[in-house]
Amino acid sequence: MTKYAIINVKSIDGSIFYVKRGEERVYNILLLEEDGIKNSRVEDYMQLSGYRVIRRQLSYSDEYKPLFQDMDMVAIECEVASVHYELCVYLRRITWIPLIVIANSAEEWEKIKMFQAGIDDYIEVPFQQAEMIARIKAHIERYHRLTRPFGIIEVGDIRIDAIDRQVSVRGEYVHFRAKEFALLLYLAQRPNQIVSKEELYKAVWHDDDGYGEYNTVAVHVKRVRQLIEKDVKNPKYIETIWGIGYRLLG
């Protein structure tokens, strides 16, 4: 059994958090930092919490690709997040590792736009060190839990077997049709991430030109809710993000 020493650490901003030291794996974070960021301690906080940080200047190129196979997260630190919308879309196309943005801008429309680009979290500056590290830890652990080779995803009372394509809810097997299963699995693989109707349609129906067919998505989401929710009028798992799409709360 691996032994750990639990260290009580007082952070620079005064908050308290705990770090495990021992033979556990050290996770790697690629920190893309916008030119001109001053007095940032993001890298220091990450390293203090036991992460290995590889810092690069934020740019629009393919230079990051060789690094992804060894990374457990990509963090973008910038002033105005929406400026880097296209970069986030590009990064999400080539990797599924957690992608977070740490930015000074905090407009609601900007956050929504960046979630649509595929990011997993948006951290506003200023922030509490302990909260930032807790979010990073949660995203990395969730990513590795969902991508482990066994193909089992558990969300609350729902257990999804991606290999045998079976779903159990509150301990009982529930029959899903092919599209219903594909839709639930796609959302479950992106817990707490907003997924647009367009993205769902393209992923589940494999149709890049299905504009105007998004009502089909709504119909199937309704069916999935009927299979997994105790109260479909007050869903616990699949949340509707009005005007955008859906999010599975994990």
Image: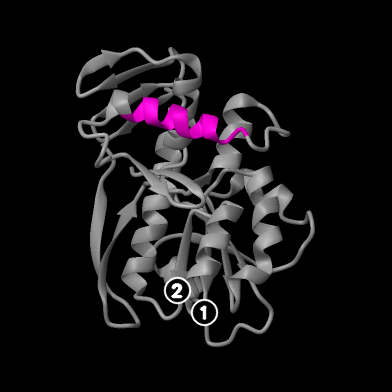
Regarding residue 43, the answer to whether it shows in the image is: yes
Q: How is the image coloured?
A: one colour
The structure residue drawn at horizontal position 22% and vertical position 16%, both measured from the top left corner, is 172
Provide the residue designation for mark 1. Answer: 104
Disc 2 is placed on an element classified as strand
**Magenta residues?**
213-225
In three-dimensional space, the C-alpha distance between marks 1 and 2, rounded to whole angstroms, equals 6 Å
Regarding residue 192, the answer to whether it shows in the image is: no
**Depicted 147 relative to depicted 130: above or below:** above
Residue 176 image offset from top left, x and y in percent: 39, 16
| Upstream in sequence: badge 1 or badge 2 | 1
**Depicted 162 relative to depicted 247: above or below:** above
Task: State whether the magenta stretch is mostly helix, strand or loop.
Answer: helix
| Rendered image quadrant of residue 230 | top left
Residue 36 image offset from top left, x and y in percent: 66, 84
Query: In front here: 213 or 126?
Result: 213
Residue 199 image offset from top left, x and y in percent: 59, 40
The structure residue drawn at horizontal position 71% and vertical position 55%, both measured from the top left corner, is 64
Provide the residue designation for mark 2. Answer: 124
Q: Residues within 10 Å of mark 1 (few under 14, many from 20)?
A: some
**Does residue 50 appear to the left or right of 31 in the view shown?**
left
- Given the current orientation, which residue lies at the most extreme bottom position? 39
Counting every numbered tag in the picture gives 2
The structure residue drawn at horizontal position 58% and vertical position 87%, both measured from the top left corner, is 38
The structure residue drawn at horizontal position 57% and vertical position 27%, both measured from the top left corner, is 204
Q: Amino acid at mark 1?
A: Asn
Q: Amino acid at mark 2?
A: Glu
Disc 1 is placed on an element classified as loop
**Depicted 18 relative to depicted 165: above or below:** below
Q: Are marks 1 and 2 in contact (CB under 8 Å)?
A: yes
Residue 236 colored in magenta in the image: no
On-image quarter of the N terminus = top left
